[in-house]
Image (cartoon, coloured by chain):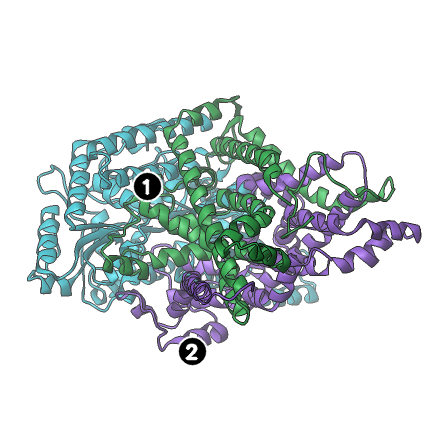
Chain colours: A green, B purple, C cyan
Amino acid sequence: MLRAGLFPFPPFGFPMQTKRTTFRSYWLPYLLIAPQLAITLIFFIWPAGQAVWQSFLQEDAFGLSTKFVGLRNYVKLLNSPEYLASFETTVIFTVCTAGLSLGLALLFAVAVDRMIRTASAYTTFILWPYAVAPAIAGVLWWFMFNPSVGVLTYALQTMGYDWNHRLSGTDAMILVVLASSWKQISYNFLFFLAGLQSIPQSLREAAAIDGAGPVKRFFTVVFPLLSPTTFFLLVVNINYTMFDTFSTIDASTAGGPGQSTTILVYKVYEDGYKGLDLGSSAAQSVILMGIVMVLTFIQFRYIERRVQY
Amino acid sequence: MVENRPFLTFLAHLVLILGVAFVALPVWIAFVASTHDQATFLGGSMPLWPGSNMWETYRTILTDGVPNSGTPPLTMMMTNSLIMALIITFGKIAISVISAFAIVYFRFPFRVLAFWIIFVTLMLPVEVRIMPTFKVVADLGLLNSYAGLSIPLIASATATFLFRQFFLTIPEELVEAARIDGAGPMKFFRDMVLPLSQTNIAALFVILFIYGWNQYLWPMLITTDEKFYTVVMGIKRMSDVADSDPQWNFVMGSAMLAMLPPVLVVIFMQRLFVKGLVEQEK
Amino acid sequence: MQRSLMAGLVLTSALVAPLAASAQTEITWWHAMGGRLGEKVDEIVAAYNDSQDQFHLTATYKGGYAETMTSAIAAFRAGEQPDLVQVYEVGTGTMMAAEGAVYPIYQLMEDHGQDFDPSAYLSAVAGYYTNTDGQMLSMPFNSSTPILYYNKDIFAAAGLDPDVAPVTWADVEAASRAIVESGAATCGFTSGWISWVQLENFSAWHNQQIGTNENGFGSMDSKLTVNGPVQARHWENLAKWQAEGLFKYGGPAGGADAPPAFYSGECAIYMNSSASRAGVLTNIDFDLGLGMLPYYADVEGAPQNSIIGGATLWALAGASDDEYEGLADFLTFLSSAEVQADFHQFSGYLPITNAAYELSIEQGYYDENPGADLAIKQITLNEPTANSKGLRFGNYVQIRGVIDEEFEALLAGDKTAQEALDDLVERGNSLIADFVEANG
């Protein structure tokens, strides 16, 4: 059995794995798990529970008048074309961002894996963006694509492409996808590289002796062995694009033009954090949580089985 | 290398050079921006090569503080970021390693439930539950404190999973041997599990340090005392000016300096980091 | 701080007053002034703290306007709110509706024996923040109004008279055409804050209604009516000029791309807040011209007067009487002519009080800085009408977002101006209805 990468297994299986040999104690495991659980319950579960409750209420920002409205916040959302449009935007954005950052990261990792002397130099450069805060990354990309002074806008214009992410939804989508995947390439790259380096040389040599060329070898031997890593990264990336990208979006396009880059989490942020429409934003959060839970469940349930270890 | 194919090697170099260009470009632009004065900056097209103002910018930031930014000195904010990042990093590692140990090496009622509860934290970003979380922290009296800055961010599903995955690869024989020797779980944990996890801990250290260092919205929400301002917050403050324009050279210069600690961590720990990810089969 | 400690020591050691406050009363103020303005605020606060021994004010920067307001509300819900918070004008509706959460300024001043005369404030400013009884609910702090900036060098290069600012939209169009056709610049004009400048101020400037009940001043339960023919004509023109390359869109909200386009000489004319003046001056190396907002000469009643934007200070409920005592004292200090004139001259925001305006005249500020009083002249050009007093709607932060979205849909050619404005009104009214229900 070969394990490559950090997450040879999905985080939990059905049934959940343990050691065959375990220790016995009635109180020790609870003591060990208590700090983690306590912090999770106090700072995550309890507030999230309140968010769920909030989604059934209509309330002013200060919490001075509260009214129970049942499912009305949800009904309103599902009848709003703007909200439904942001589903589609989210799907496009997530697929593009995860695809681009995973694809490029894998490409770079495969290339670095061939290097001997220069590997660490390349690695160092590719790792750099990982250290940049998302809030700052958004500013950097806004700056480069600025219609007046941006370097990339200028380059594109010289090539005959009239870049304007303020008016073209497609350009804006490209911008946020680039800025968001840029942040994530380093992370994916590291995991892919680690995965590649843990594949025994002997396996590749065996395939080479069988007469498989480099491309065929990659797809028949290397990539399947990377699938646990890829699977893990897919989960992490989807999670990243759905949740952690709003400061990048906020700094670069602010969800526009129109609503063409307003993804679900950005809408939560905009309606709740900026607009103080608490009921609606809580309902959106709950829907979002639901989607991610279902997605995660599907991923673990079905994709997991097709992943080779 | 299985066999030598010059063309593939050339292609690989080409891919990497383009890749590095793509990946490094924004950072390069930020650096270039920090070396020009304000006027060049918005006075036309953005230059691609460093200007002559570099020493002036960095000297000002480091010795006088960023002028007209309304932020406390950079060194103080960097220290706060460091403290916050370190508490988060060590806190996360500590509580995750013991909870993963409990999950892997014990069978106890509600084990799966506990695991699920921890897992769910992956799906609840701070922004989504900001008001209630703020209230909890305020009720506990943690506003304006390092504890308030870090403890709510310490729970970590990622780190718990990582350790769990690693523990599952530790050979069964070790546990059996330990039990035969009459070693208790904590002795086994101390003498076997922790030393074996060293490289994993190193890898996590990098990931979590950067996570902690780059926090923005949370510190912004719960600090009202300049003494606790962090550097990412400070940079946002410099670039977020009402009815006026940011001094981009200083903003970018500060951003470059703020990037340094995490970049240094990544570079210096790179070997350990990659090793931590690779060496699972020991 | 040190001085107060000393004072405390002296007092206690002399045993003169055993009950003397060795610790001052702490007052807190959360604001959204980053950058240079943040430093100015710190300076004002330091001056206040030095001016007396009884209170100690701490001012805290809480991020942008949205972050400051949300932080304050989150803090209020947790019982940890500051005494004073700076809220942007679009948050006014929310603050006014929160009756149990705010301590109206007029009442605060009255309860604590401070001299407070609303008529000392510029009526165009104060009017925006008073209730229907003419009582001031929040303390004006930084207010501005959009004006027109232009690049005299480009005007000269295009063969236009650099000393004459465009007055009407026909002038703007003609000048833009001359500039683009002569190659003096690639774009005629750009604008920050489309919602604020090209819709709200545009409507007030042309005496067109923005919403029912005096633009929402009369009742929370009001409707937007900003889809009239004059607004539709203007938006249609903007879209047309954009397509012809005369106008360049600077992005949603504040329009982050507009200032660089003007600074770099790409666009010759620029409309934005009068408070941007200092920023403009530090970023350009050409001759700057200033003018009032353009208007359509054939619209009856134009030009009327422009309206303000910016932020005011709200006192929050739940503090002790001592704190309010200090707060009232500080607000009196803050609105003194010296402090206001200094802040006005430093920042380009409007002088809030008549006294600060007169003091600035006296100090010769407008003689040295021609055009600096343009904004004041513009908001006081005529006695405000029901259409030009300002606007006040609930959920307006989101409505601003809707305005940007509809404007973008117009520019992208997805909608006509009338369609965009109709949709804007419909979506905006549904947001207002939500607000009414939540606060009802």
Residue A48: where, in percent of width, then height?
A: 60, 36
Q: Identify the subunit bearing mark 2.
A: B
**Label 2, residues with CA under 10 Å away: few <14, some 14-19, many ≥20:** few
> What's the mark number on residue C128?
1
Question: Disc 2 versus disc 1: distance between alpha carbons?
Answer: 48 Å
Query: At 35% across and 75% down in the image, what residue appears?
Result: B51
Residue C215: where, in percent of width, then height?
A: 29, 33
Q: Is residue C296 visible?
A: yes
Location of the C terminus of chain B by quadrant is bottom right
As rendered, which of A199 and C357 lies closer to the eye? Answer: A199
Which residue type does callout 2 highlight? Trp
**Residue A235 located left or right of residue B275:** left
Which secondary structure lies at badge 2? helix
Report the residue that reaches farthest toward the front. A210
Give the foreground label among 2 and 1: 2
**Label 1, residues with CA under 10 Å away: few <14, some 14-19, many ≥20:** many
Residue A19 placement: quadrant: top right
Which secondary structure lies at badge 1? helix
Residue C306 placement: quadrant: top left
Residue A202: where, in percent of width, then height?
A: 64, 58
Which residue type does callout 1 highlight? Tyr
Is C33 drawn above or below residue B46 in the view shown?
above
Query: Which residue, given by chain and number where applicable, does mark 2 sit on?
Result: B55
Location of the N terminus of chain B by quadrant is bottom right
**Residue A292 located left or right of residue C31:** right
